[in-house]
Image: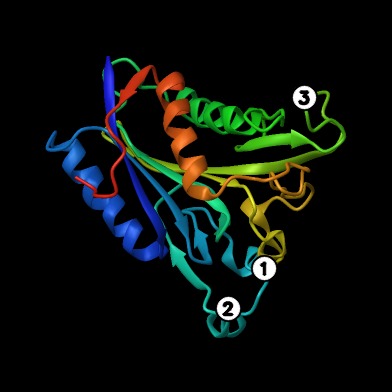
Amino acid sequence: MRTFLPVWLGRRDYASVHALQRSLQERRIANEIPDTLLLVEHDRVVTLGRNANAQSNVVAPPAWLASHGISVVETERGGDVTYHGPGQLVAYPIFSLEPDRCDVRRYVRDLVRVMALLCADHGIGAGGRDQFIGTWVDLDAPHAWPGDERATRPAKVGAIGVKISRWVTLHGFALNATTDLRDFDLIVPCGIKEYPVTSLQQLGVRDVPAVDALARRAVAHFETVFEAKALDLTTSPP
């Protein structure tokens, strides 16, 4: 059975964790460390994927962002512009998909499933969509995801952006728990204008757990979805 090391980093700035991810990916490719799952809550930051149209999709002026302590960081992940901030669980699996999970679409679906299971813990039905990467809910039926074709008011509760090198993963997902959704007005999230962003709190979940508690539940769901055994949760990266 696969095993992985879960690491809770707490509240951290984006740039330092981005550097840590890249270092761990290189070490995982070299088989120097086990599969590692970084779990973190970020300070406010706007990140740009490889295909980001920053001119159109970063709405707030750079000077305003800087004056409010919101950094803008270019990354090597796929996708467009996204936002991270307090009240959001971010998961970065540094996993080798070899030998039996070398399928990018399957990997993305697996990340959707982990977030959907976290939503289900709180009575929210969530799932994936064919044309839009991420984890979605139907605002007209928040307790049971009806499927992409039947959803009448889709809203994104979790974003996904990944980079895979030599079948070792980088980046991951961000699930909105108690995130201040007004911060998403600073950007066009993932370049999608026609559908809103939501959170567990906005969906009516009472007593949404703190991000560290969500992180512990995420570990269990990664075990289920990736058919793996988690080692003891730690706060120290390998």
Quadrant containing the N terminus in the rendered view? top left
Q: Which of 233 and 194 lies nearest the eye of the viewer?
A: 233
Of residues 228 and 30, the one nearer the viewer is 228
N-term-proximal mark, 2 vs 1: 2
Pointer 2: what residue? 65
**Where is mark 1, residue-wise?**
186
Q: Residue at x 79, y 48 (%)?
A: 194
- Vertical arrangement, residue 21 with respect to residue 130, above or below: below
Residue density around tag 3, few if under 14, some if 14–19, many if 20 or more, within 10 Å: some
Query: Which label sits in the foreground, 3 or 1?
Result: 3
State which quadrant residue 53 falls in: bottom right
Find out whether the residues at labels 2 and 1 contact each other: C-beta distance under 8 Å: yes
> Helix, strand or loop at disc 1?
helix
Q: Which mark is residue 199?
A: none
Q: Secondary structure at mark 3?
A: loop
Q: CA distance from mark 2 to mark 1?
A: 9 Å
Judging by the rendered image, the residue that carries numbered circle 3 is 144
On the picture, is 146 further left or further right than 63? right
Between disc 3 and disc 1, whose residue precedes? 3
Amino acid at dot 2: Leu
216 left or right, relative to 190? left
Q: Position of residue 151 (x, y in %)?
A: 82, 29
Q: In the image, what residue type sits under mark 3?
A: Ala
* Image location of residue 209, percent across then percent down: 59, 45
